[in-house]
Image (cartoon, grey):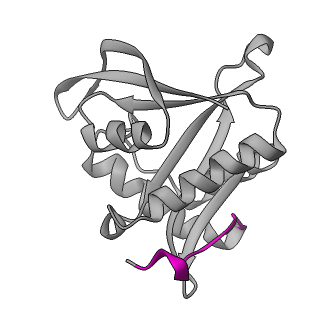
Amino acid sequence: MDTSAITIRPVTTADTEKIAEIYNHYILNTTATFETAPVSTAEMEQRIATISATNPYIVAEKQHKLLGFAFVHQWKQRQAYHITAETTIYLSPDRLRSGIGTTLLTELIRHCRQKTHYRTLIACITADNNASCKFHEKHGFVRASLFRQVGSKFGTLLDITDYQLIL
């Protein structure tokens, strides 16, 4: 896909339904998220409002069609972690390996470096998601941890791995 025609912009409430649709696909069909029940549009709207009030939350679109979204949020709640954020990125399933993820993550990292107080980004990935692990490595993230059998979804015990990028 020609990513030059892709627009990256801040999220708006008009994006809520499509973001919920994309995310719910991953909830229902993959282990990329450990949520197991679909998220309503109302719940997604609340999540977007909460996160975007203090953190970058961006979307990728082409010809007014939302193709994916990315954001960061505080990694842990303790005050000493205030310099660390966790990244989240999801693409419409028909847009995987199209360059849109790279466009979104590159912009998210740039924004965090230039406009936030964050010094470290963490990507928490289901360990068997090799595509996501390689994607984050390509963008400078380094594997920092592996937690074994910390989740269970679709009858399978799941490991997670954290990848870290020092800004």
Report whether residue 46 is seen: no
Near-viewer residue (17 or 65): 65
* Picture residue at 82% right of the left edge, 32% below the top: 117
Of the 4 image quadrants, the one containing the N terminus is bottom left
Q: Residue furthest left?
A: 155
Please say if 165 is above or below 57.
above
Near-viewer residue (73 or 21): 73
* Picture residue at 67% right of the left edge, 36% below the top: 73
Image coordinates for residue 125, horizontal then vertical, percent: 39, 32
In the rendered image, residue 162 lying in the magenta stretch gets the answer no
Please say if 78 is above or below 12.
above
Report whether residue 26 is seen: yes
Of the 4 image quadrants, the one containing the C terminus is top right
* Picture residue at 33% right of the left edge, 40% below the top: 134
Please say if 71 is above or below 11.
above
Near-viewer residue (16 or 78): 78
In the rendered image, residue 10 lying in the magenta stretch gets the answer yes
Q: Give the range drawn in magenta.
A: 2-12
* Picture residue at 73% right of the left edge, 50% below the top: 111
Q: How many marks?
A: 0
Please say if 155 is above or below 80.
below
Image coordinates for residue 136, horizontal then vertical, percent: 43, 39
Image coordinates for residue 162, horizontal then vertical, percent: 45, 23
Q: Residue furthest bottom?
A: 63
On screen, residue 29 versus residue 155, left or right, reads right
Q: In which quarter of the image is residue 104?
A: bottom right
Near-viewer residue (77 or 131): 131
